[in-house]
Amino acid sequence: MSNETIDRVALVGGTHGNELTGIYLLNKYRQFPKLLGQHSFEVELFTANHEAHRANRRYIDRDLNRSFRQADLDDDSLFGHENELAKQINQKLGPKGSSRTDMIIDLHTSTAPMGINLVLTKTDTFHLMLADYVQQRMDDVSITLEKLPDHHFLMSVAPQHVLVEIGATAQGQLRQDVFDKTEQTTQLIFKFLNEYNNHQLPQPSECIDVFEYFDVMFLPTDVNGDIAGMVHQDIQDRDFTLLRSGEPMFTLLNGDDVIYDGEDCYISFINEAAYYDEKKAFAMSRKKTFHIG
């Protein structure tokens, strides 16, 4: 693995304004900078969407974390709060493709009991080693992958990046267990980066399991497009377990069950409150094993 030093790291919170954990971890480090620690890199504390936070909403006009495709950043005809904010953030932390920021750690929470979820967009040695490093040192860590040719995540502004997603916690709520896990995960990533910069990384695992997203399932709707049922109790809170063809996945308001008929897959973000704006019920992924190195 070529070892280019990580010199500038942005720790980002508030990409979604009602996910308070990252916002308040940044506030903690601003008030008590010694708790951030001394590192071999510069850390910028960056709150992404102040307006959405003040409104205690996920976003104002559109999801900021879906607004960073290069095509959208280059499109001057796109208006609205998050489209304009994405361009500003791209200039502050990027620009994408020649970023002044080497690494972005983007802090999120989920209303689903996801445990500690590290989201990757790349499976090169650096990112697999980072995920493995955290997984070997903390319990209940799952690795997910979303590969896109022109990625829409805020963190994609920097060449190296990871999204930390921890749940369950409600929107607009601070929970100590989720807060503490977020801080512990962040500090472990810092430790990894320090050891990476100093050529002191321990031998990684030979391989790592990653859940790669391939589709999403939507809630059942009626002829008017209104939600007509709910996630079946048998799959509720079963994040990162296998959904098999023939299992019930929804219960309709009339009491009937809707049975899953498709390839067996791993499901997560089950009944995620943040996805009700698009009527998404859960994400679907395949488990893949990647060799590290």
Image: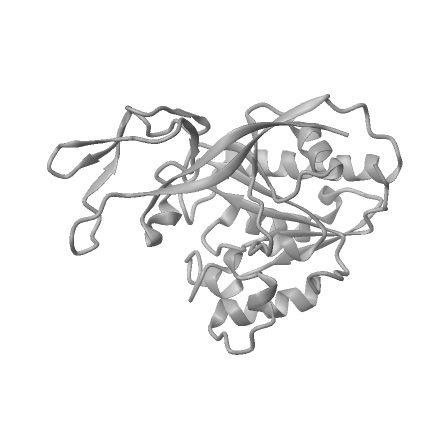
Identify the residue at image location x=36%, y=45%.
Answer: 273
Q: Which quadrant of the structure image shows residue 168?
A: top left
Tell me the quarter of the image containing the C terminus. Answer: top right
Tell me the quarter of the image containing the N terminus. Answer: top right
**Residue 283 shown left or right of residue 128 in the figure:** left
Query: Among all residues in the image, which is located at the extreme left?
Result: 254
Nearest the camera: 9 or 118? 118
**Residue 210 shown left or right of residue 219 in the figure:** right
Question: Residue 185's x, y, as percent?
Answer: 64, 35
Nearest the camera: 63 or 222? 222
Question: Residue 76's x, y, as percent?
Answer: 56, 77
Identify the residue at image location x=28%, y=24%.
Answer: 246
Identify the residue at image location x=50%, y=31%.
Answer: 286
Residue 76 against residue 63 in the figure, above or below: below
**Residue 137 shown left or right of residue 224 in the figure:** right
Give the colour scheme shown.
one colour
Asked whether residue 1 is in view, the answer is yes
Nearest the camera: 260 or 158? 260
Identify the residue at image location x=75%, y=35%.
Answer: 125
Count of numbered marks = 0
Asked whether residue 137 is in view, the answer is no
Question: Residue 29's x, y, as percent?
Answer: 67, 48
Query: Among all residues in the image, which is located at the extreme bottom?
Result: 77
